[in-house]
Image: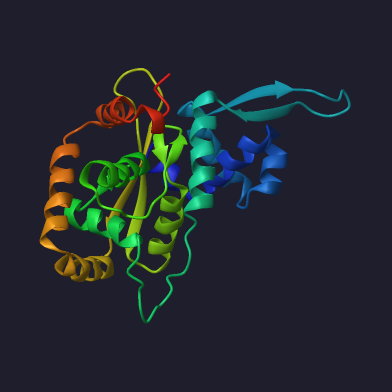
Amino acid sequence: MEELLKEKRVKEILISLYNSPKSITDLFFEVRGSLTTIESKLDKLIANNLVKEEISKKYPSRRVQRILSLTEKGKEIAKYILMTEKIFKKQEIEEVKEIPIDRKKWILLLLYLANEIKGTTRLMKYLFLMKKEFNIDNEYKFIPYLYGPCSFEVFEDIGKLRKIGLIEIDNEIYEPEKAGDWQIITKYKLTEKGKEFSEKIYNELNDENKLKLKKLLEKFSKYTLIELLHYVYHNYPEESKGIE
């Protein structure tokens, strides 16, 4: 399943059906590729319960049509793909002579010390707790939103850091061990260029902030995501939205 969802044609089919159900003919005209390829991908998506089909004869003068639509699981995955394609759309890496050391450095430093951070929500909470519990003013402004305090500036900076080739982003889709929704996790880590740049920033950081960052990761990297969210909701209720 994970490999299937990485295929470009599969993503195009899911996004097309997310917009509206379609006949195989309409889907063929919207999604690039041969009819054989599209049908092959559809068979796999149907087998994995992401797409369903119904037989419809809307007009008596026409032949029976296969009407394709997304299952609830398919809608969830298509929505996520659509969101990440929009936010983290791959762009050509810009060559820059000088990279400004501003608030984005805190994202780089977290990734430098953690090696990898799984999930935008976790990264967001680390930046929030950095301000609240370790008194580091990282300049991000947080508001109550889904899954607690959120800063849309973080999304903006992630896109910029990726564009200049300092971080790389990978989406992984996991099948649940028990019944429930599929898990889609965005993983963040530094590129080789990012590691070199972040090392320089880290070496210039004062010892107090170095220690604070290490303590933050030592403490909260042990938390599961649910535990981390409960911690933030409990300790900062005015800046969070509780779990329903």
Name the quarter where the C terminus is drawn: top left
Q: Is residue 169 depicted above or below 76 in this figure?
A: below
Give the vertical position of 126 relative to 58 (above or below).
below
Q: Position of residue 139 (x, y in %)?
A: 37, 55
When the figure is inspected, residue 204 is found, relative to residue 71, above or below; the finding is: below
Residue visible at 53% across and 37% down in the picture: 79
Which residue: 35% across, 79% down?
98
Residue that protrudes farthest toward the right in the picture:
61
Instruction: Give how far across and how far down residue 180 sits, in percent.
Output: 39, 20
Q: Is residue 88 left or right of residue 169?
A: right
Residue at image point 54% right, 44% down? 82
The one nearer the camera, 32 or 184, is 184
In the displayed structure image, the side of residue 96 where residue 223 appears, left or right: left
Nearest to the observer: residue 65 or residue 168: 168
Asked whether residue 162 appears in the rendered view, the answer is yes
Q: How is the image coloured?
A: rainbow
- On the rendered image, what quadrant is the N terminus found in? top left
Q: Is residue 47 left or right of residue 29?
A: left
Horizontal and vertical percent position of residue 65: 73, 29
Image: 196 above or below 215: below
Residue at 44%, 42% in the rendered image: 5
Q: Is residue 10 visible?
A: no
In this rendering, the count of numbered labels is 0
229 or 86: nearer the viewer: 229
Q: Provide residue 196's location: percent of width, then percent of height.
A: 21, 70
